[in-house]
Image: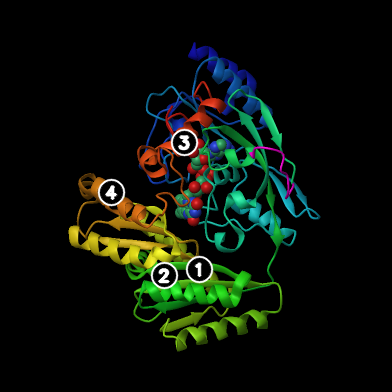
Amino acid sequence: MMTGLIEQLSAALGKQYVLTEDPDKAPYLTDWRKRFTGKALAVLLPKTTEEVSTIVKLCATHHVAIVPQGGHTGFCGGATPDNTGKQIILNLKRMNQIREIDTANQTMTLEAGCILQAAQEKAAAQDFLFPLSLGAEGSCMIGGNLATNAGGTNVLRYGNTRDLCLGLEVVTAGGEIWNGMKGLRKDNTGYDLRDLFIGSEGTLGIITAAVMKLYPLPISQWTTLVAADNIASTIALLTLFQRRATSLLTGFEMMTQESLTLNEKHFPQMANPLKGNPPFTVLIELSDHESEDHVRQLLETILEEAFTANLISDAVIASNLSQANTFWHMREHITLAQAQEGANLKHDITIPLSSLDSFILETDALIRKNYPGVRIINFGHLGDGNLHYNIAPPPGVDHKIFNLKHEKPIQELVYAQVERCQGSISAEHGVGQLKIGDLRAHKGEVAHDLMKSIKMALDPQNILNPHKVVSI
Ligand SMILES: Cc1cc2nc3c(=O)[nH]c(=O)nc-3n(C[C@H](O)[C@H](O)[C@H](O)COP(=O)(O)OP(=O)(O)OC[C@H]3O[C@@H](n4cnc5c(N)ncnc54)[C@H](O)[C@@H]3O)c2cc1C
């Protein structure tokens, strides 16, 4: 029966786009963090929406589950199949066309397999900003960004992927093509299907194309690194910048001393330029459409105010674009430094800004008391209240052994603190297979049951990415 499916798929896509040999499938089977490895009946590489529709119809007939996949950079194992060898991976990378840039509507229409960086570059070539930006932008894809509702470094000013999307094209679990590609900023015609598919991690439909918002390209950007002694000052600094710079504030990223010490260990060229690597380093970016001088003066005025109020003890303003890029690379390399150091315990959480101070003080103290010597690699998009609160074993301790023993209790400790502060256990990375077991307790029974009802209504056969996000 499966041979019949593979033959039908090969006839529909072309044999070379149906990968069934182990060496060909291998690159698609392990997630970026190397936490999950699965098996697949085949990896399919369609080129058109019609081909995706054909795949879904054939798989539905044969009761074969489909795991949609983009750049495979997700952190929750959502794009990795299970280990039965019965699921197929549908990778969108050949659907990488930018169909249109509509300058009057300020939108870009593009296919799901388009690499994020390619989209940014295409927009910039026409004097537009496509603001979605994250460390994986050289390999993650628009479909994956939408399916995970990715956040990144520009959420503070432009919102997350959901906020940037005006329209979607989706292949449903029945293989129908839903054309929701009107690039409208207002459309109150009943339930918002677009918002249902965004963030659904491939469990409700396969996103094949999207209409995304564009913005005018800023003409000037100033980036600074500042030193703060404690988290309370860091939050007060954010409030100050939000009040003074308002919409010109486009980045506010926090990095603790331990995060940057780890960075320097693996990337010596990324050493913190601030004297003595202070307890908290904050990367702040202001962007403007007026003159260079205007934003530079504003930045200096706010920094002076921050010094006077004792919120910061040191600051360095990037003197040119290349230095600004170095500051950003320092921030983005923390994830890579962690990967080099060895598997660590990741917690991608959001805390209301009003509780962030108490969250960090209490959780740090509990972790240090219960697990002496561990490194708390805490950094993140502080402007959004989003922390990557990651725990690495004490230096010299084997990561695998430490994680095996302590993952569960450390996660319980951190999540209990998140609940105490009314935060979220997944700020921007999603649920996938990693957090599926934690969702019911976190969301509550009513929300969890509603999610299951939606899944059953849209995918009654449970063939789209089963056992990810919610199990039915
Ligand atoms: C170095 C690094 C830095 C990162 N920084 C950030 C960050 O700042 N913010 C952030 O939010 N994330 C970040 N991530 C995580 C990751 O890059 C994002 O989750 C990204 O949006 C995933 O896109 P992808 O194309 O790789 O999706 P994949 O990993 O391939 O898939 C992710 C999920 O979406 C589903 N999916 C993929 N394509 C489709 C589609 N076309 N239709 C339906 N479902 C689909 C998959 O089944 C899976 O469940 C980072 C990752 C790395 C490696």
**Residue 294 visible in this rendered orientation of the protein:** yes
Disc 1 under 8 Å from ligand 1? The reply is no
Identify the residue position indicated by label 2 in the image.
269
Q: Which kind of residue does numbered mark 1 sit on?
A: Phe
Q: Earlier in the sequence, mark 1 or mark 2?
A: 1
- The amino acid on which the numbered mark 3 sits, given as a three-letter code, is Tyr
Q: Which residue is mark 3?
A: 28
- Which quadrant of the structure image shows residue 174? top right
Residue neighbourhood size for the residue with mark 4, other residues' Cα within 10 Å, grouped as few (<14), some (14–19), many (≥20): few
Q: Which mark is residue 320?
A: none
Against 406, residue 387 (above or below) is below
| Viewer-side residue, 335 vs 245 | 245
Q: Which residues are magenta?
A: 184-192
Q: Which residue is mark 1?
A: 252
Say which residue appears at 43% left-offset and 68% top-offset.
Answer: 254
Query: Mark 3 or mark 4, which is nearer the start of the sequence?
Result: 3
- Residue type at the position of mark 2: Gln
* Kind of residue at disc 4: Glu
Residue identified by numbered label 4: 412
Q: Nearer the viewer, mark 2 or mark 3?
A: 3
Between circles 1 and 4, the one closer to the viewer is 4
Secondary structure at numbered mark 3? helix
Ligand 1 neighbours mark 4 (CB distance < 8 Å):
no
Residue 212: percent from left, percent from top? 68, 49
Among the two numbered marks 2 and 3 on one chain, the one whose residue lies closer to the N terminus: 3
**Residue nearer the viewer, 265 or 290:** 290
Q: CA distance from mark 2 to mark 4?
A: 36 Å
Q: Position of residue 280 (x, y in %)?
A: 38, 73
